[in-house]
Amino acid sequence: MEELHPDLERVLFSESDMRARVREMGAAITRDYEGKDLVVISILRGAAIFMADLIRQIDLPLEMDFMAVSSYGKRLKARASCVFRRTFRPTSWGRDVLIAEDVIDTGLTLRYLIKNLQSRKPASLSIAALLRKDIPEQADLPCHYLGFACPDEFVVGYGLDYAEKYRNLPYVGALKRSAIAKKA
Ligand code: IMP
Ligand code: MG
């Protein structure tokens, strides 16, 4: 059984919720990418766990790649601009690129990455996000495969962190205000 971490308010998505949903997302991607040249790119570090689970539910040949952008540090919201760190291999030219993102919050990170990857002329570019917060700034952003709509709270677990902690929790939960105050 999952025991709630003392710094968390409540569990939003359990380990089994996640497993079931990621399996459905993988099945949809498998249907859509049959015969294509799929490269799944995850955004380090938050999306690494989602990506690892997702690609094992995609029953097609594929490659994986990683991109890194600036992290939040101990702040709760993205900066006004995003700093691109690195891509490990320039695999996107002419290929069917699927970005695996952990959570779309303000949408700044994704907007930046879409622009960056479009300039490398992929054959197609789609987004798979585990979570999407319900906030108006990013309502126009495309998200082709979505795990769960997420309340506008700061969440951790399943790859998502606060100040690099909690990534290894097997579920996603809302962080207590007191845990944020403690570290800020
Ligand atoms: P955005 O650029 O505001 O959409 O933020 C996207 C990135 O910020 C995600 O890839 C996460 O790494 C991080 N992020 C946004 N919201 C949360 C959260 O609630 N918990 C942990 N990380 C978050
Ligand atoms: Mg991230």
Image: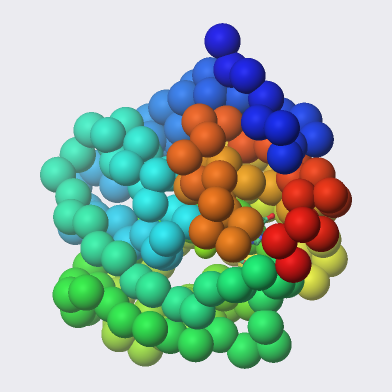
Residue 52, percent from left and from top = 32, 42
Instruction: Judge whether 15 appears above or below 114 on screen.
Output: above
Asked if one can make out residue 124 in the rendered structure from this viewpoint, the answer is no
Residue 42, percent from left and from top = 37, 60
Instruction: Judge whether 23 appears above or below 37 on screen.
Output: above
Residue positioned 84% across, 66% down in the render: 136
Asked if one can make out residue 84 in the rendered structure from this viewpoint, the answer is yes
Q: Is residue 144 left or right of residue 96?
A: right
Q: Which residue extends farthest front?
A: 182
Q: Is residue 53 left or right of residue 4?
A: left
Residue positioned 45% across, 54% down in the render: 47
Q: Which quarter of the image is occupied by the N terminus?
A: top right
Closer-to-camera residue (121/53): 53
Residue 183, percent from left and from top = 71, 61
Please give the count of numbered marks on the rendered protein.
Answer: 0
Closer-to-camera residue (5/53): 5
Q: Is residue 49 left or right of residue 92?
A: right
Residue 143, percent from left and from top = 58, 57
Residue positioned 74% across, 67% down in the render: 184
Instruction: Judge whether 154 appears above or below 7 on screen.
Output: below
Q: Is residue 157 left or right of residue 148?
A: left
Q: Quadrant of residue 140?
A: bottom right
Q: Quadrant of residue 163?
A: bottom right
Residue positioned 38% across, 52% down in the render: 48
Q: Which residue extends farthest top?
A: 1
Q: How is the image coloured?
A: rainbow
